Amino acid sequence: MTSDFFDAPIEDSFEQPQQSNQDLLKGLTEPQVEAVTTTEGPLLVLAGPGSGKTRVITSRIAYLILECGIPPWNVLAITFTNKAAGEMRERVSKVVSQRQSEAATICTFHSLCARIIRQYADKLGLPPSYSIYDTSDQKRAAKQALEVLGIDTKNFPPASVLNAISNAKNELQNADAFAGQADDFYSKKIATIYKKYEQILDQSHSLDFDDLLLKTVQLFREHPIVLAELQERYQYVMIDEYQDTNHAQFMIANALAARHKNICATGDPDQSIYGWRGANIQNILDFEAIYANATTVRLEQNYRSTKRILAAADALIQNNSARKHKDLWTDNEEGELIEVLTSRDEREEARQIVQEFEKLNCDENVAWGEMAVFYRMNSLSRVMEDALRDRGIPYQIARGTAFYDRKEIKDAVAYLRAIVNPADEINLLRIINMPTRGISDKTVKSAQASALASNVSSIQILMQPELIPNLNTRAINSVNKFMGQLHHWREVAGLNEEGGMLTGGTMSLPDYVELVLSECGLQDYYRNDKSDPDGERLANLGELITSAQQFAEDYVAEIDNEIRENAPALLREMLLGFLEQIALMSDVDAIESDQGSVTLMTLHAAKGLEFNVVAMIGVEDGMLPHDRSQNDENELEEERRLCFVGITRAQKRLIISSARYRTVFGQTMPTIASRFIKELPEELYESTDLSADDFGSSSFGVASSGGQATGISAKYPAGTMVRHPKFGIGRIQNVSSMGGHTRAQVAFNTVGVKPLILEYAKLEVINIEEEPPF
DNA sequence: ACAAATACCCTTTTT
DNA sequence: GGGTATTTGT
């Protein structure tokens, strides 16, 4: 009955007419066809920007299913973000049927691993309800480790400790392996912390991001039968953005494809921008060496950008030494000149770009949704936001996690995690007294101390607070009451204290979230929060319920398609899925295409996307390339690739913008345009300088011709001796006005020539006769 | 227990 | 500068 139903073509022809081989390959170029139809054996697709790579991958999945008759559940496609996965599935479902596209596995490495681990949790000694720790959970765990070990966070800041641990994990080094090869003081110390950190996570039945990969590799190693099962399941493996895979990811892909050898890697070494996160560019460069009989296809024709934009990108990337050369070319039109914009400061920069956008929107009918602004650092978005808001232009920011980073949301989610995973100490302690319920810091501390003394977990002790020494009855009652509440919430969700399953759990997910938020007191707390008169935080909690509702709807739809006549989705399953989605959410996942709004995002987030109009802001030395990569040639090349990625996102128009002065941390600093701008061929762009500066002519004693000696500049003619609170005594060399500000070059006795803004610098005019400089 | 004050991280990029 | 975490004061 079931199989009959499944095989029946009626539904399929309803949804989409079956496409023939010809249709599937129609409009593809010769190399694209080769990439699509080479289904057996290892295949490397080196795809330049805008070369139709996504189309090739989706066509390839469709070809496998429709043409080769491969069952969709044998196909695994790994993407870099959830959003990319969703879009790819969407596109595949346009060619094959909805149901077939859903039977194929299309997801990120991390969600694949999260699911594998959940399925085989018992083999790893974990409950299926294990928690996934995000950066802030990790930080708490690291802090706890440091505290227990009595290590000063001054010398070992949690962030850098975690960075070291993450690097080790990406190289598949567990705590013991790391300790084994630690030979200096610092790494030995890290090894100790690593071990403790692992203990805390173990005890909490929790995994961090890197563990998802690490534990999967461990599972494969220790349980060859599991691996064999998965190899049979995923006979065709495709990995996108292969240039950004790290060692652990390489091992996973490699292991899955080891039996059938049908591995297809797509990517572009010139777009490798995650080296800092452990991505190993050698994975793609060595593909042909690792898979001896690999076919390599190069996609070099660009369908996205104008000739000028592509030429600029190509000229830039030629400056990198360690690369495989590609002949990028396009049949597209010549296009407009690239605009290299120089503004006075970041506010002016933002205004100018908004003005350009408005002009394009008005004169050329370019929709807001076709425009994007990229920057190196998230903090640059703020000025841009202000400028867009001023003009009433709709915009969206790729910061999906920002919502889940809010304190009230983190707390709410911590409740859910603590309920689902009864061992999750980090999340339990986060909310044990939030809102306050008479469980003071002191109570928690003594619980932890007594747990440590009797060698059990803090949670076990909290279940029997009367065993904690020196605890008054009030505190004991408060703890008992709270633990009882937790128990009650678990019952409603159909969970027991071991994270196992009970019957029940029939409430809907959003209703359940609402119930917990109301019963735990968070809602009341924020309803009465005087520091938040607009009730913004309360509204955010409401948003969380809405997103739970959204998730439940999608989930039910999916399940319905998969196992139609099976039991209704259990609350417990949905809760697990919801928490997983929250944990693995990425910034770009939140952005929606065709939303009719300007998109703001970091250069990293922009990978894989394209826009009609692109503005890159803050293209200054120290920003792009970033300060922290100035001294390392490899890192500098990665910055150049980042710039390359940004440029190649643009279809028709590209604005590369810098400001002469940028305020970072409230400190205004002079900047220099990025060296990358100088690497662009001059005939490809036109410069617009709106900084009204005199280009820093350093002639002595000559005031800028344009700048009238009015206002503040009248007080400081060239030649004036001044005293600066920090730099001491100096002589003004020249003065120039820049709109609102007045800029001066001042030669100091101690630190040499400094550019200063007279309005900001607290300069004091001194008379050399009255006060000799010593 | 709560409000206010201070201290302290932050800012390179993220699954 | 901006927000959160920790502390101090009432």
Image (cartoon, coloured by chain):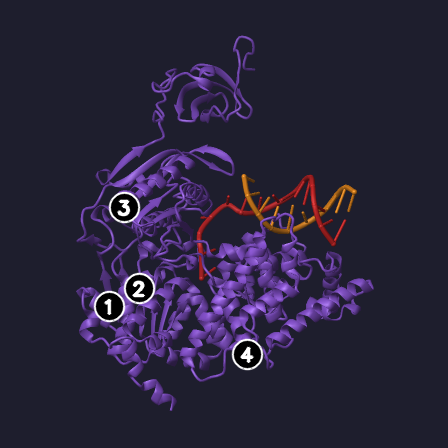
Chain colours: A purple, B red, C orange
Residue count near mark 4 (Cα–Cα under 10 Å), binned few <14, some 14–19, many ≥20:
few
Quick check: do tags 4 and 1 share a chain?
A: yes
Q: Please state which amino acid type lies under the numbered disc 2.
A: Thr
Tell me whether circle 1 and circle 2 mark residues in contact (CB < 8 Å). Answer: yes
Q: Say which residue label 3 marks.
A: A653
Which of pointers 2 and 3 lies earlier in the amino acid sequence? 2
The chain that hosts pointer 2 is A
Q: CA distance from mark 1 to mark 3?
A: 30 Å
Q: Say which residue label 2 marks.
A: A266
Q: CA distance from mark 2 to mark 3?
A: 27 Å
Count of residue discs: 4
Depth check, mark 2 against mark 3: the one in front is 3
Q: Secondary structure at mark 4?
A: helix
Residue A103: mark: none
Which of pointers 1 and 3 lies earlier in the amino acid sequence? 1
Which of pointers 3 and 4 lies earlier in the amino acid sequence? 4
Q: Say which residue label 1 marks.
A: A35
Residue A46 picture quarter: bottom left
| Residue A107 locus on image (x, y percent) | 40, 68
Quarter that holds the C terminus of chain A: top right
Q: Please state which amino acid type lies under the numbered disc 3.
A: Arg
